[in-house]
Image (cartoon, rainbow, N blue to C red):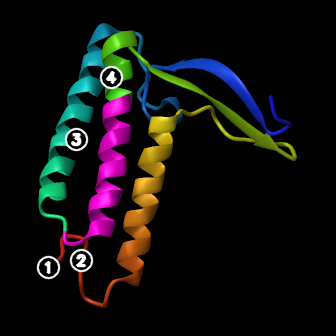
Amino acid sequence: MLPFLDLVLVHNRGVTFGLLASDHPAGRWLLILLTGTITVALLVWLRRAQNRTQAAALGLIIGGALGNLMDRLRHGAVTDFLDFHAQGYHWPAFNLADSGIVLGVALLLIAELRAPTGRALSGR
């Protein structure tokens, strides 16, 4: 496709970089429950968002989590397909939902670093 990008098909039964991967059916449902619980907590945080930047960041994270959750429910694993590499460096395959999560977390961190001193992410 491009000299730095290949499209691949990888079914990730774990979380980031395949951590907690398991072929046992209980592992799949445990990750579904964990993702659902974290998503609900993020939705609560979103309702209390202090500004648009925080809301957008949380929206990206929630959207990515829901995308991966749908994959896990439908296929039993998250489908990764983007494989970037350059100058001998190779990044593990990922998907667009993962990109949303990473961008959302980065946006939260940038917003927090730019916030006035003494204000936590919770807005207190």
Q: CA distance from mark 3 to mark 2?
A: 21 Å
Structural distance between the alpha carbons of marks 4 and 1: 34 Å
Residue position for label 3: 39
Q: Residue at x 62, y 31 (%)?
A: 93
In what element is the residue under mark 4? helix
Image x and y of residue 41, in percent: 16, 48
Say whether disc 2 or disc 4 marks the residue closer to the N-terminus. Answer: 4
Mark 3 to mark 1 CA distance (whole Å): 22 Å
Q: Which residue is mark 4?
A: 70
What amino acid does circle 1 point to? Arg
Image: 25 above or below 41: above
Asked if the residue under mark 1 is in contact with the one under mark 2, i.e. CB atoms within 8 Å, the reply is yes
Q: Is residue 81 left or right of residue 59?
A: right
Q: Is residue 7 above or below residue 120?
A: above
Query: What quarter of the picture does the N terminus occupy?
Result: top right
- Point out the tag, 4 or 1, that comes first from the N-terminus: 4
